[in-house]
Amino acid sequence: MTAELSPEILSAIGCQSVPRTEVVTRRDIRKYAIATNQTERKYLNGDVAPSMFHLALFWDVVELDKLLPDGVSVDTLLPKFPLTQAMAGGLELKYFQPIHPGDVLTATRTLVDIYMKHGSKGPIIFYEVIMEVKDDQGKDVVWEKTTRLLR
């Protein structure tokens, strides 16, 4: 299969999501802590969120029939790619302050790069999305760069 990165696809670089604001609840922290098998009492009590809590906080809530085969919802930030088999490529995280119940957090996602490489099994498209999470004072809470691969 040949795949090309058209000018239309590449023009999506720099596109940014509408900022999404969520209020952190003790119950959400506790549910996440239990689901991820945390053992520290501060997480299980919901006093502070464990690492990666922010990921689920900003996921779309959609009906099951709206999910893709891999269990995630359609990402409206992304253009339609000529390759569709998605794989994880990497996750880089920087934490600036802990997340507590009552925090009001806003996340903005930006598509920062799209590029293609040719491997032994054919073309692979890479894309990178940066998510910045800030508190209600505009201070940085989390910075995240996700790299995904498409075959």
Image (cartoon, grey):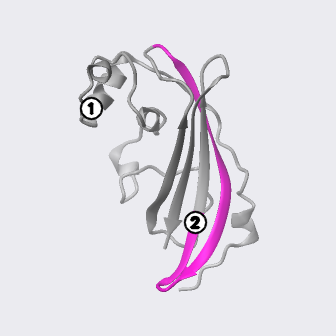
- 43 sits left or right of 142 in the view: left
Q: Quadrant of residue 132?
A: top right
Give the percent coordinates (x, y) of residue 82: 57, 73
Magenta residues span: 102-126
Q: Quadrant of residue 57?
A: top left
**To which residue does mark 2 refer?**
126
Q: Secondary structure at mark 2?
A: strand
The answer to whether residue 46 is visible is: yes
The answer to whether residue 77 is visible is: no
- 29 sits left or right of 84 in the view: left
Residue, x 35% and y 24% (percent of image)? 29
The CA distance from mark 2 to mark 1 is 32 Å
Q: Nearer the viewer, mark 2 or mark 1?
A: 1
**To which residue does mark 1 refer?**
38
* Neighbours of disc 2 within 10 Å: few (<14), some (14-19), many (20+): some
Q: Is residue 121 magenta?
A: yes
Give the percent coordinates (x, y) of residue 150: 51, 68
Amino acid type, callout 1: Gln
Residue, x 51% and y 17% (percent of image)? 103
- 101 vs 86: above or below: above
Q: Secondary structure at mark 1?
A: loop
Amino acid type, callout 2: Phe
Q: Quadrant of residue 63?
A: top left
Residue, x 47% and y 13% (percent of image)? 102
Give the percent coordinates (x, y) of residue 15: 71, 49
* Neighbours of disc 1 within 10 Å: few (<14), some (14-19), many (20+): some
Chief SS of the magenta region:
strand
